[in-house]
Image (cartoon, rainbow, N blue to C red):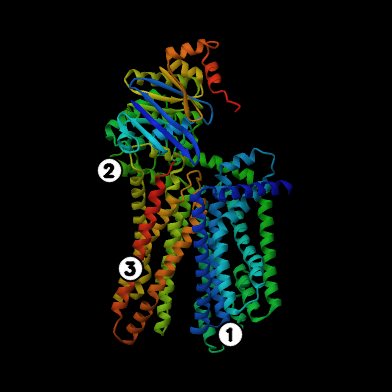
């Protein structure tokens, strides 16, 4: 135990030293970060408060349904945290150079495993905690909750909830690595990805949210009554349900119900953590050795693939462009933490598009139709922002310590920057267009809506790519090899929050024109073309300004000493 | 040819390199010596465009490294002190990558890559990913990368780190051959015997300032003042003043 605390204290000391500002540039960056964090927290607070007010007082869905919606969001959140933790844990437990150092010291495997687990957990969950707590404040303030509600929910519910997701993730990872000794690693990865999709499909098919809404709405206006008997039995064993129940019971003043659900969550979480640590102590070293031999096998197996992209082949591109693009392609395809994450996100995206495409919404009021449309738009934008953060932000940092070879070669750093940016932008724009196309099929009859949302998505893709790429260059860390850790760094967190502010601004600008458009479309009144044009103009201008500022910051940073 | 014209590099109030001037003509093998933290790597990083000088001018083969960085970089090859490579690329891919950055025609590049692979005896492992390489193998690949475009100037920071005796011999012979062909070599090293063996001229830097600069003959004279060893000259010159 003393050893564990010692290691954790050293890690804390390292983190504090790295975070402490010793130069003017760092101080400015820290002040800027603080402003962005604060702005984001305030934004998230008001967003949560307004959404709560809107659903409960404007749409009037009732407390029961409202908390069932929270449960759905929490389920997706749980899977996201869990999937993210699998990838991060794989990188830090099996790919980190620090592991060779720790394993060569007289430290028990269980301690090493726990240290890295906690390291991952707090490192990769910092932003989520910040965002979740700001949302919790918004939610709680709407209901006028007492001060002790917030720390109780944060430490008694939110932390155990995320800890449970992370513990399950490392248990799955250990199982995968244990099986990797006898089963093809790619097959195992495919099984894990399929398992996550099956969980999503099973959850939505078992809970059937649309049926639940219909059932509850049959009793309208008595929607504040507890309709727990309508919940499918299986959901009562899920942590997202416990979390939502704690909130619901606390709001309605049923303390015993809140406490019992919180206890279930805490005990399950502790149990999962204990199991994870025991399994880590028993299997970590063995699976680490498996990962080493696996690395060697997969390296050799993949060397001769995709001959079209080999460096020796002639290309129509200019040599600089060809060299940088081919290098990026190979580095991406040969790094499991990159392609596995891309595959998972790609799969989730397909599920999302398929779900939205097949959604049969029998909603009568134009207001509600508009809100549903905006929610989907926000989700699209959020998806693009997340992908931009994960893949665009680390692009410059991933040059790594081999960056000397490019900086000392006859190519301007800005040329490298623009080549990589062009690739990133193309990818995000294509993705944005695909998402826009997939989610706008039901709205074919409203051309102005299609055009404005198309421009909106392009603006978000463009500004998101620029912001993440530019800030990624400004906050480049050439010593960190792990792209996930780069995308979870202080600079990345700040960039994500800035992106959220940008999204909020774009959605805010679009909100009333889109609502008006739906209302006029379904009531036969004149369409608000000029209002929409103005909104589009403002959005494009904001996107352009954000892009320019980001590139200026990124390009200036590239001139720094290496 | 290398010209360092009153270059200074300051980090805050600390001058890592302080008003350093030096000319290395074509065909000369220059040894750059100094204790740890003397400013050797900082000087080399300024020469290769990785650092920007606070003051002064650096010309490599007639091109100003700050004003005409692309032209300057076309003319030199650089071997850093730590041979970091892209882990997921093979050694051969890295050589092609560097060749493409130098905009070499593909056909010529293929021949050159084969030639340096042969010269540095890399063939048996060059198609493995560099993450599998030892330190010495990485170092040999960085040497190969520096020779791919047949540079007129070679800048080396601690060249023998991790090299086995056979590889060290190959590298030394290649560098000597390059100087015979008219290239200038600027080599920073801690290994005094190597400087003694290879260099036409030696400079010793201490606390950012050049404290000794002399040809082989001058170096010899200086050595005779002590016990005939370059090591003694070095230790005496870089002895820390207690005040």
Q: Earlier in the sequence, mark 2 or mark 3?
A: 2
Q: Which mark is residue A318?
A: 2
Q: Which residue is mark 1?
A: A224
Q: Which residue is mark 3?
A: A454
Q: Is residue A131 above or below residue B7?
A: below
Measuring from the top left, give residue A55's x and y in whole percent: 50, 80
Measuring from the top left, give residue A201's x and y in whole percent: 50, 67
Labelled pair 3, 1 in contact (Cβ < 8 Å): no
Same chain letter for marks 1 and 2: yes
Labelled pair 1, 2 in contact (Cβ < 8 Å): no
Please report the residue visible at 33 percent of the width from the left and 28 percent of the height from the top: B151
Please report the residue visible at 34 percent of the width from the left and 35 percent of the height from the top: B65
Of all residues, the one furthest to the right in this rendering is A2
Q: Quadrant of residue A530?
A: bottom left
Q: Quadrant of residue A71?
A: bottom right
Name the residue nearer the viewer: A42 or A500: A42
How far apart are labels 1 and 2 at the CA level?
66 Å
Mark 3 — on which chain does it sit? A
Mark 1 — on which chain does it sit? A
Q: Is residue A445 visible to us here?
A: no
Q: Earlier in the sequence, mark 3 or mark 1?
A: 1
Work out which quarter of the rendered image holds the N terminus of chain B and state it: top left
How far apart are labels 3 and 1 at the CA level?
39 Å
Secondary structure of the residue carrying numbered label 1? loop
């Amino acid at each position: 135990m003393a050893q564990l605390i010692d290691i954790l204290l050293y890690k804390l000391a390292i983190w504090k030293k790295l975070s402490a500002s010793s130069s003017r540039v760092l101080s400015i960056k820290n002040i800027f970060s603080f402003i962005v964090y604060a702005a984001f927290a305030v934004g998230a607070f008001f967003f949560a408060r307004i959404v709560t007010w809107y659903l409960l007082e404007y749409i009037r869905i009732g407390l029961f349904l409202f908390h069932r919606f929270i449960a759905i969001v929490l389920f997706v959140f749980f899977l996201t945290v869990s999937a993210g933790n699998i990838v991060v844990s794989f990188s830090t437990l099996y790919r980190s150079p620090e592991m060779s150092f720790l394993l060569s010291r007289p430290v028990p495997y269980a301690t090493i495993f726990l240290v890295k687990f906690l390291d991952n957990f707090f490192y990769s969950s910092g932003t989520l905690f910040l965002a979740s707590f700001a949302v919790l404040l918004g939610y709680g303030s709407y209901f006028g909750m007492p001060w002790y509600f917030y720390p109780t929910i944060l430490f008694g519910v939110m932390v155990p909830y995320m800890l449970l997701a992370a513990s399950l993730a490392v248990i799955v990872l250990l199982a995968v690595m244990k099986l990797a000794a006898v089963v093809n690693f790619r097959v195992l990865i495919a099984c894990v990805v399929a398992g996550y999709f099956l969980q999503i499909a099973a959850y939505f098919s078992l809970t059937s949210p649309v049926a639940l809404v219909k059932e509850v709405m049959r009793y309208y206006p008595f929607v504040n009554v507890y309709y727990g008997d309508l919940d499918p039995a299986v959901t009562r064993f899920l942590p997202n349900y416990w979390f939502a129940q704690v909130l619901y019971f606390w709001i309605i003043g049923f303390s015993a119900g809140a406490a019992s659900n919180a206890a279930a969550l805490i005990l399950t979480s502790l149990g999962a953590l204990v199991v994870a640590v025991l399994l880590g102590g028993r299997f970590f070293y063995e699976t680490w050795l498996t990962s080493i031999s696996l690395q060697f096998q997969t390296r050799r197996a993949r060397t001769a693939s995709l001959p079209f992209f080999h460096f020796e082949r002639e290309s129509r591109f200019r040599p600089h462009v060809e060299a940088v693009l081919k290098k990026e392609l190979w580095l991406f395809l040969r790094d499991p933490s990159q392609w596995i994450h891309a595959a998972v996100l790609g799969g989730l995206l397909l599920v999302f598009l398929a779900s939205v495409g097949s959604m049969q919404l029998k909603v009568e009021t134009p207001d509600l139709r508009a809100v549903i449309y905006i929610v989907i738009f926000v989700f699209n934008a959020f998806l693009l922002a997340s992908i931009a953060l994960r893949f665009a932000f680390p692009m410059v940092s991933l040059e790594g310590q081999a960056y000397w070879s490019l900086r000392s070669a006859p190519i301007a750093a800005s040329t490298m920057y623009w080549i990589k940016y062009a690739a990133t932008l193309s990818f995000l724009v294509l993705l944005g267009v695909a998402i826009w196309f997939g989610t706008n099929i039901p709205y074919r009859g409203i051309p102005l809506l299609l055009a404005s949302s198309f421009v909106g998505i392009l603006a978000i893709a463009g500004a998101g790519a620029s912001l993440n790429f530019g800030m990624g260059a400004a906050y480049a860390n050439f010593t960190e090899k792990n792209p996930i850790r780069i995308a979870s760094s202080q600079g990345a967190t700040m960039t994500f929050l800035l992106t959220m502010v940008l999204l909020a601004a774009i959605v805010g600008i679009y909100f009333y024109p889109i609502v008006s458009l739906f209302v006029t479309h379904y009531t036969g009144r004149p369409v608000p073309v000029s209002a929409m044009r103005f909104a589009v103009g403002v959005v494009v201008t904001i996107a352009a300004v954000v892009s320019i500022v980001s590139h200026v910051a990124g390009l200036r940073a590239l001139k720094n000493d290496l | 040819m290398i010209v360092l014209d009153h270059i200074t590099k300051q980090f805050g109030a600390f001058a890592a390199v302080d008003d350093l001037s030096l000319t290395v003509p074509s065909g000369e093998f220059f040894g750059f010596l100094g204790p740890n933290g003397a400013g050797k790597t900082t000087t080399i990083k300024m020469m290769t465009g990785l650092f920007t000088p606070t003051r002064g001018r650096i010309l490599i083969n007639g091109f100003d490294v700050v004003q005409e960085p692309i032209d300057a970089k076309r003319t030199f090859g650089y071997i850093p002190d730590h041979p970091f490579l892209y882990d997921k690329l093979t050694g051969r891919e890295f050589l092609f990558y560097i060749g493409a950055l130098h905009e070499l025609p593909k056909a010529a590049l293929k021949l050159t890559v084969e030639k340096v692979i042969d010269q540095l005896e890399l063939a048996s492992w060059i198609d493995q990913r560099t993450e599998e390489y030892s330190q010495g193998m990485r170092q040999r690949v960085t040497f190969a990368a520096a020779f791919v475009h047949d540079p007129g100037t070679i800048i080396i920071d601690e060249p023998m780190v991790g090299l086995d005796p056979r590889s060290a011999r190959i590298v030394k012979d290649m560098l000597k051959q390059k100087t015979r062909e008219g290239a200038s070599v600027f080599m920073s090293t801690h290994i005094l015997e190597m400087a003694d063996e290879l260099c036409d001229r030696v400079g010793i830097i201490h606390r950012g300032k050049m404290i000794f600069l002399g040809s082989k003959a001058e170096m010899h004279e200086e050595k005779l003042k002590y016990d005939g060893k370059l090591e003694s000259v070095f230790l005496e010159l870089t002895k820390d003043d207690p005040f």
